[in-house]
Amino acid sequence: MIAALKQMEAGRTAAEVAREVGVATPTHYQWKAKYGGMGVSQAQEAKQLRDENTKLRKLAADLSLDKEALQSVIRKNRMELVAEKAAIERLQCEYAFSQRRACGLLRVAVIPIPERAE
């Protein structure tokens, strides 16, 4: 690619160089726009940076998706806990059940209520 660009800088036409390299002339002009004036090491470094940038973008997208999924689970669990707590309280009030009995009926672990220091 860099060699093809150097040939064009030496005076050959873009069509000749593109035909020799086996690419379309517009592709050759894209290379010129992207890599014109660069050396081989600079072009390799630019490619490495683009590849690393692509990996980082994918990683950021994956992490954002993970965050959203975890937040969804937390929201759902929070709603489920609120519903369970309301059901336990309803059983305690309407039927005068103890917390232990209400939790046992709903197959929920007993939620310890800390005693107040008065």
Image: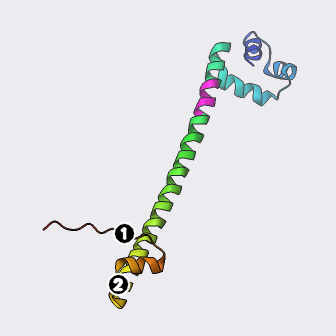
Q: Residue 4, relative to residue 70: is it above or below?
A: above
Q: Which residue is mark 2?
A: 92
Q: Please say whether residue 15 is one of the residues in the magenta stretch.
A: no
Task: Give the mark, 1 or 2, whose residue is nearer the N terminus.
Answer: 2
Give the magenta-colored segment's residue range.
Answer: 48-53
Q: How crowded is the residue under tag 2: few (<14 C-alpha within 10 Å), some, or many (20+)?
A: some
Q: Quadrant of the C terminus?
A: bottom left
The residue positioned 86% from the left and 24% from the top of the image is 22
Give the residue pinned by disc 1.
111
Where does residue 109 sit, x and y in percent of width and height?
43, 69
Left or right placement of residue 99 versus residue 57 in this view:
left
Q: CA distance from mark 1 to mark 2?
A: 13 Å
Badge number at residue 81: none
In the displayed structure, would residue 89 be above or below residue 35?
Answer: below
Q: Is residue 77 above or below residue 36?
A: below
Q: Amino acid at mark 2?
A: Gln
